Image (cartoon, rainbow, N blue to C red):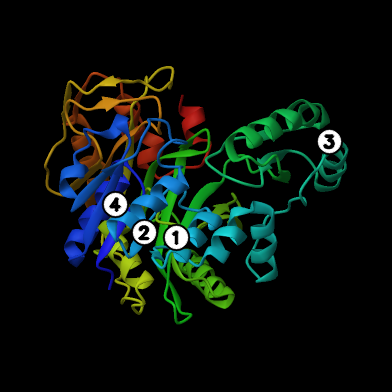
Amino acid sequence: MFSKVLVANRGAIARRIIRACSELGIASVAVYSEADAGAPYLEEASEAHALAGNTAAETYLNASALLKVLQSSGADALHPGYGFLAEKADFARSVISTGAAFIGPDPKWLAAMGDKVAARKLMADAGFPVFPGSEPLENLDQALAAAQMLGYPLMLKPSAGGGGIGMRVVRDAKELKKGFGLSQKMAMAAFADSGIYLESYLATPRHVEFQLLGDNDGRVVHVHERDCSIQRRHQKVIEESPAPGLDRGEVKVMADRAAETAERLGYNNVGTLETLRDTSGGYGFLEMNTRIQVEHGVTEAVTGLDLLAEQIRLAAGARLPVIPELRGHALEARIYAEDPRSHMPSTGVLQLFRYPVLEGVRVETGYCEGQAVTPYYDPLLAKVIGWGVTREQAIGRVLIGLRAFSVQGVKTNIPLLTRVLEDGEFLRGHVHTGFLQDFL
């Protein structure tokens, strides 16, 4: 087992990793930007090191600065969390070159799954279902030819990165001509890669993902599924497990297939295989996230597993844990610092920031009262995770948790979250990726 882990991230996930290290008896090293100097987890870590600057590029995306802390602190492993450098193969290789361990899959998987077109081909060749799509498109003429062959409507997607950035629905050649260059520019600005491809567009699919765990001996298992269909601009807002309204036999077949495919390919450590499910019940590969997910707490709530602890153990060479059966139902609602009407980010000092301690409710946050919410990073403030014997009880507990959450100094999306959780269609489990757009 590792003796000291550098946590190369911030916010809720940094705090969560530090807690997992503490429970495993491992020392933790936090890093922080000037903007995050007041974060509560800095005192919870074994030690904390400042990174000069405020912006992500200066700090949490600054590989050389992180590697200096790795070596000066004497940490023998680095946990990248999610976002920032978590899925950068070159960074993982640099960590390993220092003699420390990278807590994640082999860097070859970061590279293979980081290119969405290559990942689609890899999964298709391995026998996993994939919806129709194109090869990488270098220019508009290639895009128009590919679109004619595939048939509209289609989705323009960057081949690097994620988070919905650069994605655009095109319903005809006119929209493709208008959107192609814009998507390329957005991809280049966000990911330093202008690669674009086309994929069949599904208007109202379900977003169903499968949590995978793999050890270094070539074994992979799934830890059931999560439904992440409540999204805005392709960003998840509410996640739950098990997926409401889906036949358990159908889901198990796909979960088993996801694990078997990953095992056949030789995947190791934690990963999430994301799929879309069309209205006829067909599944297609969307992407593979080669890291811990923001919504990992949902799976922890219905299984009792500590996924962060298991991820660390697996990276240290441990065998796979016994996977528990699903127990009850869990939901997660993401609280963002944003205007609930305009959905624009909201910044300021948290004059009041108090969250409830309730039965069946878990709150994950990297903020505390008096801390500033700045424009430099993702506006996620906290995650409220509710567990219940039934879906209805889990929803009720999340609602109570949201209503008991007190925030002043910034605006939040709590009013939107409560409206969705109280909506009749949502309560009936009639969810799809266009739900929130229709709701608004």
Number of other residues with Cα within 10 Å of mark 4, as a class: few under 14, some 14 to 19, many 20 or more = many
User: Do the residues under discs 3 and 2 have CB atoms within 8 angstroms?
Assistant: no
* SS of the residue under disc 1: helix
Disc nearer the start of the sequence (2/1): 2
Q: Amino acid at mark 3?
A: Leu
* SS of the residue under disc 3: helix
**Tag of residue 429:** none
Q: How far apart are the two marked residues, 2 and 4, measured between alpha carbons? A: 30 Å
Please identify, in this view, whether the residue under mark 4 or under mark 1 is nearer the observer.
1
Residue closest to the eye, 395 or 413: 413
Disc nearer the start of the sequence (3/4): 3
What residue sits right under mark 4 in the picture? 330
User: Do the residues under discs 2 and 1 have CB atoms within 8 angstroms?
Assistant: yes
Please identify, in this view, whether the residue under mark 2 or under mark 4 is nearer the observer.
2
User: Do the residues under discs 2 and 4 have CB atoms within 8 angstroms?
Assistant: no
What residue sits right under mark 2 in the picture? 78
The quadrant where residue 20 appears: bottom left
Kindly tell me whether residue 389 is visible in this rendering. Answer: no
Q: How far apart are the two marked residues, 3 and 2, measured between alpha carbons? A: 42 Å
Disc nearer the start of the sequence (3/2): 2
Number of other residues with Cα within 10 Å of mark 3, as a class: few under 14, some 14 to 19, many 20 or more = some
* SS of the residue under disc 2: strand
Residue 118 position, x and y percent, is 68, 58
Taking the spot 23% from the left edge, 33% from the top edge, the residue there is 402
Q: How far apart are the two marked residues, 1 and 3, measured between alpha carbons? A: 39 Å
Q: Which residue is situated farthest in the bottom direction here?
A: 217
- Residue 261 lies left or right of residue 399; in this view the side is right
Residue closest to the eye, 108 or 361: 108
What residue sits right under mark 1 in the picture? 95
Q: With respect to residue 165, does 25 lie above or below?
A: below
